[in-house]
Amino acid sequence: MIDFFYNPTYWHWLILGFICFGLELFAPGAFFLWLGFAAIASAALSLLMPDLNWAIQYFIFGVFSVASLVMWKQLSNKSESEETDQPYLNQRSKAFQGRVVVLSEPIVNGFGKVIINDSHWKVTGPDAAVGSKVRVTTVDGSLLHVVPE
């Protein structure tokens, strides 16, 4: 059994790669996917150079693993920060920030209502009369924070 760990062949790396791919089905994220790719790359290298020492093979697997995980992290960060032509998709209320609206119900004790795009929105801010113009400063869920315009 111990000989198995000291003499890995490309088959061992392939099996490890497929085990990682299988684990990816049950684990959240993509961690095991990239380890699987590293194992497959190690298998390919082991197939091309069958006389590699076991320590070098493990070292190469470690380097491939770290490199693939770093590459995945950079790619995922890049895709999250990309500009989109619909930045408020599924965040409709965020699009109201900075918008000037007219109160449909007075703000009394800090709460009132406005109508935006045929929808009633609850607002909070300093007391104001019906018809007053207010600017939406921030959005907290469906509650709009406003200041007098």
Image (tube, rainbow, N blue to C red):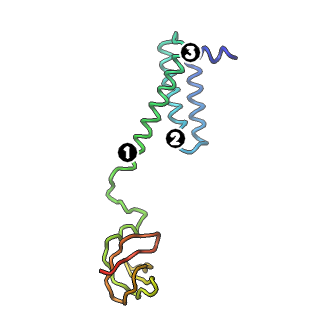
**Left or right side of 47 for 26:** right
Residue placed at 36% from the left, 72% from the top? 137
Q: Secondary structure at mark 2?
A: loop
- Of mark 2 and mark 3, the one earlier in the sequence is 2
Res 76 quadrant in image: top left
Give the foreground label among 2 and 1: 1
| Amino acid type, label 3 | Trp
Local crowd at mark 2 within 10 Å, few (<14), some, or many (≥20)? some
Vertical comparison of 94 with 81: above or below: below
Local crowd at mark 1 within 10 Å, few (<14), some, or many (≥20)? few
Q: Secondary structure at mark 3?
A: helix
Q: CA distance from mark 3 to mark 1?
A: 36 Å
Q: Nearer the viewer, residue 142 or 33?
A: 142
Q: Position of residue 88 (x, y in %)?
A: 38, 63
**Which of the numbered marks, if any, corresponds to residue 30?**
2
Quarter of the rendering occupied by the C terminus: bottom left
Residue placed at 30% from the left, 77% from the top? 100
Res 145 quadrant in image: bottom left
Q: Nearer the viewer, residue 50 or 76?
A: 76
| Amino acid type, label 2 | Ala
**Which of the numbered marks, if any, corresponds to residue 54?**
3
- Of mark 2 and mark 1, the one earlier in the sequence is 2
Residue placed at 44% from the left, 82% from the top? 110
Q: Position of residue 47 (x, y in %)?
A: 50, 16
Q: Secondary structure at mark 1?
A: helix
**Which of the numbered marks, if any, corresponds to residue 78?**
1
**Which of the numbered marks, if any, corresponds to residue 86?**
none
